Image (cartoon, helix red, strand yellow):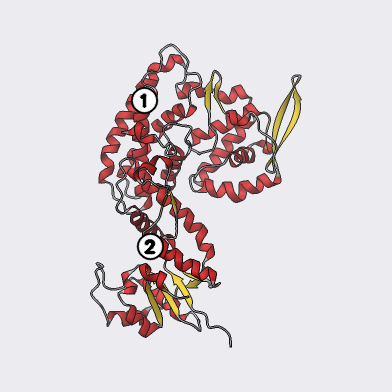
Amino acid sequence: MGIVKNTYAFDDSSILKLCTVNIPNSFQIFFQKRILTERNYNKLKSLIDKLIKYDYPKFRFVPSENLEDNIMKVANQILEGYNIQMLGNVFKVEIIDQLIEFNGQIRKEFSEIVKDEEIYGIKQTFESNLKELSKEDNMPQDDDLKIIAGYYKYGCDGNKYLITEDEHFWGYSELILKNFNIYVVKEWECHTLNV
Amino acid sequence: MILSKDEAICLILGMSKNGEVSSPTKLNKLLARLNLYFIPIDFSFSLNKFGSFSVDLSSLQANDYYGVSPYSYMGRSVNKFILKPKGQELFTETIKPKIDKILTDEEFNSLKETIQYLSSLSVTEISDNEHKKLLVDIDDRFKLKQKINENFVELSDLYQQISKLPENKIAEIRLKALVEYCYYLIKYLKEKRFKHLSEEEYDFDAHMFDYYFLYNISQVIPFLNKQISEKEKDAIAINKFYQYFVNSVKEEYPFSIDNQNLKELIV
């Protein structure tokens, strides 16, 4: 009997957080280090290393929408808590440019799961089970639903895991597991997964 | 984004007549000209009596991308540079995609026509009025100071406005960063670099980027003024100017994000 393999898929923001940003020389005085990462970097990297060790492919969802928004969001998260006392906008753009370059390289390392445009039924499931989230909008966006629809259709003998920091997913983790057989893993807990 | 030395040379050769440039001096002039098109290249230029000069070009050897072929001209041996097939491949697969991020097709074609035309001229003809344009000559010191002051005042106004700009798109953040960078750069040129420039002496061994930046800042100010009030930002042009000012220089130039003492020049 062959080994049943699980599937591990990451949303775009989580993939971007694998980027290590080189701090230009002039800004290093504000950080006392040369490399900057998002706070969940080590946890994500730990899972990625496990997948590589056991020869598991890692997946992302295509087509990639909202890339610009995701890049800006991750850049802001990387900068969180720091006080840059000169050329703050320039430093942010330097992070953005490194994220853009990183995205161009890293995407080739991920296998693809195609999002599904047919979301009518899924939308209804969510609409009739709306929850109070801390986000402004309780209802997942269409792009989130396309990810669930595509992943649901994706053939896999083992378990399907979705690693994400988006509350639109983890806020509905029970609903998503029950109806679409997808385990939602909070990004900051992903290092605890046994591969 | 910056073009490496080989990429910059292949860009020039790829756009030149017959894919060749007839001397190191001419190659130097054509590479220097890329600065006036806001294309960041990994060549440092200093100033001598005849214009901008890059020491990096004096010992250029043939490689996989271009050949160096000696020929006799007026009794002396001169090196000609010729693009090789691998250099053409580099042009198409690496250089052009980089250029596409900062120039529109129209701008690229205009640059190509200019380089093609300039490559058929003599070195003296290429130099043309570059010194006059960049206000390098002693006779132009008054104009130089006037230009610095004008640019400083205009950029101070623009800098005051950027805190009100939204940050919903990368182009908007990049525009703020561009204005911020240009403001501190012109402040550096005014208060540090050109403050004690002698009225009588030629600025030998100056870093040529002092003059390129001053000239290019004055070129970009009308664009910045327009973009600040535009709803839809011109992302390609903003990126072009940003990449040029921020990435053209490395730690050997004082006002560079790669200089670990930059803060001392700003605060």
Residue B246, given in percent of the width and then of the height, sits at 43, 39
Q: Is residue A33 left or right of residue B27?
A: left
Type of the residue with mark 1: Lys
Query: In the rendered image of this protein, does residue A118 appear above or below residue B75?
Result: below
Q: Secondary structure at mark 1?
A: helix
Type of the residue with mark 2: Asn
Residue A117, given in percent of the width and then of the height, sits at 42, 75
Residue A121, by quadrant, is bottom left
Res. A40 mark: 2
Circle 2 chain: A
Q: Is residue A59 left or right of residue B174?
A: right
Res. B192 mark: 1
- Residue A143 shows in this picture: no
For image coordinates 57% across by 33% down, the residue present is B31
Q: Residue at the bottom extreme?
A: A1
Residue B219, by quadrant, is top left
Tell me the CA gap for discs 1 and 2: 42 Å
Q: Secondary structure at mark 2?
A: loop
